[in-house]
Image (cartoon, rainbow, N blue to C red):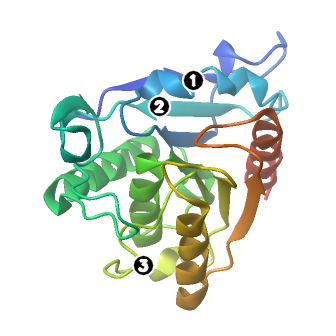
Amino acid sequence: MNYLPSIEVEPRDYLDSANAPYIADAAVIWLHGLGASGHDFQPIVPELHLPNDMPVRFIFPHAPTIPVTINGGIQMPAWYDILTLDIERKINEQQFSASVNGVTALIERELERGISSERIILAGFSQGGAIAYEVALSYDKPLAGLMTMSTYFATHKTINPHPANKNIPIHIFHGMYDPMVPEAMGKQAVAALEQMGYAPEYITYPMEHEVCQQQIDDISRWVQTQLSR
């Protein structure tokens, strides 16, 4: 099978003790935003300072390069084309579905590698977060958690949630001054999730469309909490 090209960071690449276990027993699949790549969040891994007894494989897929309508048709890495910038964000549904299938395949590959679904976290920033919502909530095996950053719930009206993840821990991070994905869209995601019966955690930071140090610290705590269960 042809998987999405990805950067993989194994425990041996960032754990700082010769006695640390180097074989991963958990995985985080982390999706970048529009115009970025899997390299975008790779430098954050050592900043999470995960304990040596928590060996995690981090997977950072690269989105395909496609023309993006809202950027004048310029080709760039994107999980799907965005046709309008209003709060509903009209998107190319066929490309969206293809990306969902590609990320789902990465989860399945981790299962084949011996990682339990309950030890897999799905994360996404901006466009990547929209894909993460769809993949995690519709996946047919329980996942360890869903983490979204500076994003929106593009398919909240059409998603078919699977009961396997009805209790999935969800943490949403957003910038108060985000000009690209206004905080109102993050709050809209919270409301939609709560209406569906989920219990998302939501936290904001005094930042724009980015990641700050406090957020990285909070992400570390959240990941450790989910993988300590």
Labels 3 and 1: the sequence-earlier one: 1
Residue type at mark 3: give it: His
Mark number displayed over residue 5? none
Tell me, yes or no, whether the two marked residues, 2 and 1, touch with CB atoms within 8 Å. Answer: yes
Q: Is residue 89 left or right of residue 56?
A: left
What is the count of numbered marks?
3
Q: Quadrant of residue 22?
A: top right
Foreground pick, 67 / 106: 67
What type is the residue that disc 2 sits on? Phe
Question: Mark 2 highlights which residue?
Answer: 60
- Give the residue at x 67% y 26%: 44
Marks 2/1: CA–CA distance: 7 Å
Q: Which residue appears farthest toward the top when viewing the image?
A: 18
Residue at the spot of label 1:
42
* Any part of residue 204 in sight: yes
Say which of marks 2 and 3 sits in front: 2
Neighbor class of circle 1 (other Cα within 10 Å; few <14, some 14-19, many 20+) is some
Secondary element at image label 3: loop
- Of 178 and 195, nearer the camera is 178
Q: Nearer the viewer, residue 123 or 151?
A: 151
Determine if residue 1 is in view.
Answer: no
Choose the circle earlier in sequence order: 2 or 3.
2
What's under tag 1, amino acid-wise?
Gln
Q: Position of residue 97 (x, y in %)?
A: 22, 59
Label 2, secondary structure: give it: strand
Residue 4 shown left or right of residue 217 in the figure: left
Residue 98: percent from left, percent from top:
20, 52
x then y, percent, for residue 198: 61, 81
